[in-house]
């Protein structure tokens, strides 16, 4: 890796002032320092790095982003309601430019013992809840963006569900960027802990205004105890000129059940990593859906680490590409020597609507156990002209027929979304977006 | 006025001329059967009439109700009342039969200046036609033709026809692969749609179907031309002699 050019790196230059300002424990200060040091060594990745071969982050490296300021009044609760894919009664924690906005948040009704709120506040008030987990899962040694986040995060969501507690209503974590000049960066940091036999649904949403070249660099760590059930949604709807590089890292207990849905609709340059480490008998489902047009670039890297026997992972990622959009899907499955009886399945399907759209899809299987079942498949296809004609022959217009088939392509992965308002709004947005593409 | 008038129609696909001058006139209420060997161009004719752009019309004209059919898009032909029961119905995963058919019926109704049907009224129509076709209602919620058996697909085609009530229906080998019970159901569905205004073009290889759907005329298509026309007895004759016999007779006549 090469570090950023000759001019002084603004992240490094600003760090001492930031570190002096940000309050924290001695151990978090040390963590931040070692992370920024690691970032200084790594620098931003280039396309010479295998992990970043098809995603050129030079526009991010070049830009001199300011740390995003706290401007909670830039957005009203009503504006937020309209933009969210949730009913307004839902429990939500709202972060504006990476800072907790209490006036936009509501605690909702939570079962006794559940703790939700601002990670910064919980760290200040009950560090013992945070210390065993923070930065224990999302490794920054080989990931410059995770390192940056670990060094520079100001706030983010915190959810802690105690043993045996079932939280029925989804908890929404909303990360709004307000844009403005000069372009700003935020590094939201979220920690979700679901103790033994608990159950929780989390929806993370990222949104911001169009026409603004801001940058969001979130990291979410999820830790589950034995038999916990976690349903996690990441809904990326950044503005059309925005940059988004994010990591979701899940450390899963024995017989836990983890489902992740990564939905990517917005942003100009997007990289989204979802990594899961399984224990014995853990079940993981990773669903993904991306829709990209214009000059959007969307890169999904997913990795499951079958560390112990009897784990199962099922991955289904589907993408629709139009215009000059490009997408990357990289699916890594690691089955360690001990992980006998692993059942891993990976599917990536792409629908390419224009001649100029590009997709790079790659499975990456590393299997060191011998008694495993591991399948993978990737497809890249166009709309079926026979299908279009069949619909036309029944009176359905050609454009509508195309939309219908496009929508049908995404259907199964969208049907897997169990949060109803989210699924409904997504269906609606999909229809609208398909329509817009044709205008 | 005749409902459909095909004059000297030529069409090609994949650089090869398949239809080499078809002439055919169909009056309202008439049922015409087309028979002919494999590859003679029967499906090509059906697809050309429905507007599939894969097939290039290189000559001739087609008038539907006095209007130039060939300049209409496939969807406009359907809205004007042309229906094709496909030889190979297309599977459309992810689109339910119910949604699909409702969208189709309402587009056609809108075109006719009729109010769109709401979910309840639509369901009423659909249930009646499903009963006619002896189809299980669970098929409505399944994706169009997806995972249907061959017979279910063919029945689904006629069911769609019953719902959409076209003025002119082309049935392309709807009988192929049906056992006798399914054949009777399909024929019954088709016969119930016969009316003085509605015409049909029935493509088949087997005289058997024509015992149930009795045609007014039978034509033989060979190498892109209609080489012989007659009444329903022509089908019986073909059953006896086969197309080879017919070709010999033709050659004899020409000599
Ligand atoms: N899409 C296509 N591309 C190339 N050739 C085609 C295509 N469709 C049809 N043909 C050719 O055109 C000729 C006529 O085909 P068509 O399907 O019309 O025959 P048919 O009479 O319906 O035959 P069958 O009784 O087998 O259904 C055949 O030689 C066939 O191979
Ligand atoms: Mg045919």
Image (cartoon, helix red, strand yellow):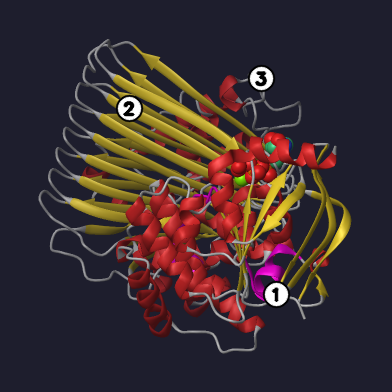
- Whole-angstrom CA distance, mark 2 to mark 1, is 62 Å
**Ligand 1 has an atom within 8 Å of the beta carbon of the residue at disc 1:** no
Comparing labels 2 and 3, the label whose residue is closer to the camera: 2
- For disc 1, the chain is B
Comparing labels 2 and 1, the label whose residue is closer to the camera: 1
**Dot 3 corresponds to which residue?**
A48
Q: Residue at x 19, y 25 (%)?
A: A310
The boundaries of the magenta stretch are B73-101
- Viewer-nearest residue: B104 or A49: B104
Q: Position of residue A435 (x, y in %)?
A: 65, 65
Quadrant in the rendering for residue A305: top left
Crowd tier of the residue under label 2, counting other residues whose Cα lies within 10 Å: few below 14, some 14–19, many 20 or above: many
Comparing labels 1 and 3, the label whose residue is closer to the camera: 1
Q: Residue A344: which numbered mark, if any?
A: 2
| Image position of A92 with respect to A242: above or below | below
Q: Position of residue A100 (x, y in %)?
A: 43, 61
* Tag 2 and tag 3 share a subunit: yes
- Viewer-nearest residue: B79 or A86: B79
Q: Is residue B108 left or right of residue A316?
A: right
Whether residue A62 can be seen here: no
Q: Position of residue A299 (x, y in %)?
A: 57, 38
* Tag 2 and tag 1 share a subunit: no
């Amino acid at each position: 890796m090469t570090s950023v050019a000759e001019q002084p790196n603004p992240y490094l230059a600003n760090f001492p002032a930031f570190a002096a300002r940000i309050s924290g424990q001695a151990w978090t200060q040390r963590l931040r320092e070692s992370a920024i040091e690691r970032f200084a060594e790594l620098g931003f990745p280039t396309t010479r790095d295998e992990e970043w071969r098809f995603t050129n982050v030079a526009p991010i490296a070049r830009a001199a982003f300011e740390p995003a300021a706290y401007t909670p009044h830039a957005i009203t609760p009503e504006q937020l309601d309209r933009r969210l894919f949730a009913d307004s009664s839902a429990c939500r924690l709202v972060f504006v430019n990476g800072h907790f906005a209490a006036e936009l948040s509501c605690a909702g009704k939570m079962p006794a013992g559940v703790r939700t709120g601002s990670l910064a506040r919980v760290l200040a008030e009950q560090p013992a809840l945070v210390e065993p987990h923070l930065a224990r899962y999302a490794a920054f040694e080989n990931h410059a963006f995770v390192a940056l986040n670990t060094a520079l995060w100001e706030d983010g969501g915190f959810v802690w569900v105690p043993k045996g507690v079932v939280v029925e209503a989804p908890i929404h974590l909303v990360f709004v960027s307000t844009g403005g000049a000069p372009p700003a960066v935020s590094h939201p940091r979220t920690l979700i802990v679901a103790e033994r036999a608990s159950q929780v649904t989390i929806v993370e949403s990222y949104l911001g205004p169009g026409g603004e070249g801001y940058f969001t660099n979130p990291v979410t760590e999820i830790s589950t105890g034995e038999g916990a059930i976690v349903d996690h949604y990441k809904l990326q709807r950044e503005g059309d000129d925005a940059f988004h590089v994010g990591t979701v890292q899940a450390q899963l207990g024995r017989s836990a059940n983890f489902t992740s849905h990564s939905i990517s609709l917005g942003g100009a340059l997007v990289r989204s990593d979802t990594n899961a480490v399984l224990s014995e008998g853990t079940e993981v489902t990773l669903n993904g859906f991306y829709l990209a047009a214009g000059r959007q670039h969307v890169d999904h890297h997913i990795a499951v680490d079958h560390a112990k026997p009897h784990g199962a992972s099922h991955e289904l990622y589907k993408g629709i590409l139009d215009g000059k959009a490009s997408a990357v899907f990289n699916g890594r499955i690691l089955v360690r020597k001990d992980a006998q009886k692993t059942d891993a399945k990976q599917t990536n399907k792409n629908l390419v609507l224009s001649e100029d759209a590009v997709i790079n899809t790659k499975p990456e299987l590393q299997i060191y156990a011998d008694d495993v079942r591991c399948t993978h498949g990737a497809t890249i296809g166009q709309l079926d002209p026979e299908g279009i004609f069949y619909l036309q022959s029944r009176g359905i217009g050609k454009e509508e027929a195309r939309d219908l088939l496009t929508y049908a392509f995404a259907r199964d992965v969208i049907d897997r979304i169990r949060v109803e308002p989210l699924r409904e709004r997504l269906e609606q947005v999909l229809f609208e977006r398909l329509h817009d593409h044709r205008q | 006025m005749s409902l459909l008038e095909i004059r000297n129609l030529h069409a090609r696909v994949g650089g090869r001329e398949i239809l080499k001058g078809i002439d055919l006139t169909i009056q309202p209420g008439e049922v015409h059967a087309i028979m002919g060997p494999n590859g003679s161009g029967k499906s090509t004719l059906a697809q050309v009439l429905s507007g599939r752009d894969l097939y290039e019309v290189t000559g001739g004209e087609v008038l539907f109700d006095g209007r130039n059919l060939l300049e209409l898009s496939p969807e406009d032909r359907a809205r004007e009342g042309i229906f094709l029961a496909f030889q190979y119905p297309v599977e459309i995963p992810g689109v339910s039969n119910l949604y699909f058919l409702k969208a189709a019926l309402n587009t056609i109704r809108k075109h006719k200046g009729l109010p769109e049907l709401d979910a309840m009224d639509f369901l009423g129509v659909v249930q009646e036609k499903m009963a006619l076709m002896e189809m299980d209602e669970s098929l409505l919620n399944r994706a169009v033709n997806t995972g249907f058996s061959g017979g279910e697909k063919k029945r689904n085609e006629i069911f769609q026809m019953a719902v959409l009530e076209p003025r002119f229906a082309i049935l392309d080998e709807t009988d192929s692969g049906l056992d006798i019970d399914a054949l009777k159901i399909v024929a019954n569905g088709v016969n119930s749609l016969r009316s003085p205004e509605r015409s049909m073009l029935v493509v088949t290889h087997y005289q058997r179907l024509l015992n149930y759907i009795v045609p007014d005329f039978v034509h033989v298509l060979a190498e892109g031309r209609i080489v012989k026309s007659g009444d329903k007895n022509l089908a019986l004759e073909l059953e006896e002699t086969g197309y080879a016999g017919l070709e010999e007779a033709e050659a004899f006549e020409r000599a």
